[in-house]
Amino acid sequence: MSSSFTTGGEYLTPRRIHADRPGSTLEIEWADGHLTRYDFTTLRWLCPCAYCRGEAGMPGWLDSNPTLTPAQTELTDLQPVGSYAIQPTWADGHHTGFYTFQRLREECPCPEDTARREREHADHGGHAAHGGHAGGQRRLG
């Protein structure tokens, strides 16, 4: 079976983005037909903003491995950012993370993409080829 993850830029264009608030999931259907599904907790852990990730050599809030509250994983709004990202607003008021389509596709938690990341990790001698944690594997408390 060939991978739906491609090395060009064609996979970066979502055909559909759907936030299922009652189900606490975000679904992204990509131009190549691949479907990415994030639960809201995993999506919040992926927040790329300076507060959550840190800046200037300082760790971010998520680096302290906090226990997320229900308000921190409740999506209240989702806005497009140009043609390259989405900006969620969480019930706790946090809204500064721009989640690029590239990152959302690269961090897709599906089994196929998880296996791809594991192969890349092994090919690089145990050093991750990308930043951040993937697929919601981080301990929440």
Image (cartoon, rainbow, N blue to C red):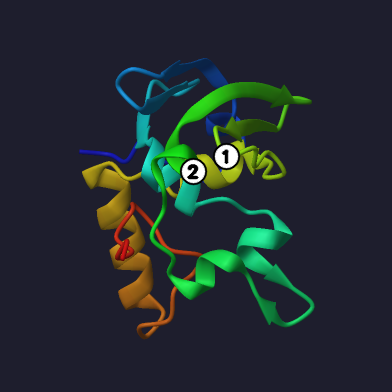
What residue do we see at 67% from left, 22% from top? 79
Q: Residue at x 42, y 63 (%)?
A: 133
Mark found first going from the N terminus, 2 or 1: 2
Could you tell me residue 113's position as x and y percent?
A: 32, 48
Q: Percent x, y for residue 27?
A: 40, 24
* Viewer-proximal residue among 73 and 1: 73
Camera-side residue of 84 and 47: 47
Split into 4 quadrants, where in the image is the N terminus? top left
Residue 138 is left or right of residue 132, and the answer is left
Q: Quadrant of residue 40?
A: top left
Q: Secondary structure at mark 2?
A: helix
Residue drawn where x is 69% and y is 23% of the image: 80
Q: Secondary structure at mark 1?
A: loop
Q: Residue at x 33, y 53 (%)?
A: 136
Q: Is residue 131 left or right of residue 59?
A: left
Front one among 22 and 8: 22
Residue 130 in percent (x, y) is at 52, 65
In front of the other: 56 or 141 = 141
Q: Looking at numbered disc 2 in the image, what kind of residue is underneath it? A: Gln
Say which residue label 2 marks. Answer: 72
User: 88 above or below 17?
Assistant: below
Give the answer, above or below, for where 141 lies relative to 116: below
Q: Is residue 92 left or right of residue 105?
A: right
Instruction: Tell me if I can see residue 130 in this picture.
Output: no
Residue wearing tag 1: 92
Q: Do the numbered discs 2 and 1 sit on residues whose CB atoms are within 8 Å?
A: yes
